[in-house]
């Protein structure tokens, strides 16, 4: 089993945690979850379910802490996306 990697929700723009083929990508203002994971009825499934549960609990705790502090908006504004010319065209 790979070593556990630290993943503090909303802490940076770099961390990615994998559970099966499911990826949790850290951002300062969002956690992006993509891919899939089979939570199989065996030890591997139990291990993956525990990792996923722990990580989602950490995300929930971070959201609740910011809500308690009055720092959680009703809805996050969409990101400011800029288009640039293709340097290879």
Image: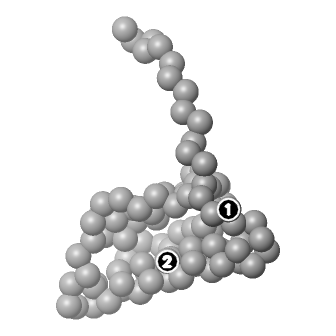
Specify whether 50 is left or right of 77. left
Q: Which residue corresponds to mark 1?
A: 73
**Residue 13, relative to residue 63: is it above or below?**
above
Task: From the viewer's side, name the closer residue of 5 and 71.
Answer: 71
Relative image position of residue 60 (x, y in whole percent): 57, 78
Task: From the viewer's side, name the closer residue of 82 and 75.
Answer: 75
Specify whether 72 is left or right of 88. right
Q: Secondary structure at mark 2?
A: helix
Furthest residue in direction right, as rendered: 69
Decide if residue 54 is in sight here. Answer: yes
Task: From the viewer's side, name the closer residue of 63 and 35.
Answer: 63
Relative image position of residue 88 (x, y in whole percent): 39, 11
User: What residue is drawn where x is 46% and y is 58%?
Assistant: 32
Q: Which residue corresponds to mark 2?
A: 56
**Residue 38, relative to residue 26: is it above or below?**
below
Q: Indicate how the structure is coloured in the image.
A: one colour
Relative image position of residue 40 (x, y in whole percent): 21, 84
Within-10-Å neighbours for mark 1: few <14, some 14–19, many 20+ = few
Report the Cα–Cα distance between label 1 and label 2: 20 Å
């Amino acid at each position: 089993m790979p070593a556990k990697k630290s993943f503090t929700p909303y802490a940076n723009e770099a961390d990615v945690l994998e559970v099966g083929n499911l990826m949790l990508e850290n951002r300062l203002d969002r956690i992006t979850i993509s891919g899939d994971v089979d939570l199989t009825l065996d030890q591997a499934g139990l291990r993956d379910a525990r990792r996923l549960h722990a990580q989602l609990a950490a995300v929930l705790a971070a959201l609740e802490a910011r809500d308690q502090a009055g720092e959680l908006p009703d809805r996050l504004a969409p990101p400011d996306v800029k288009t640039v010319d293709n340097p290879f065209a």
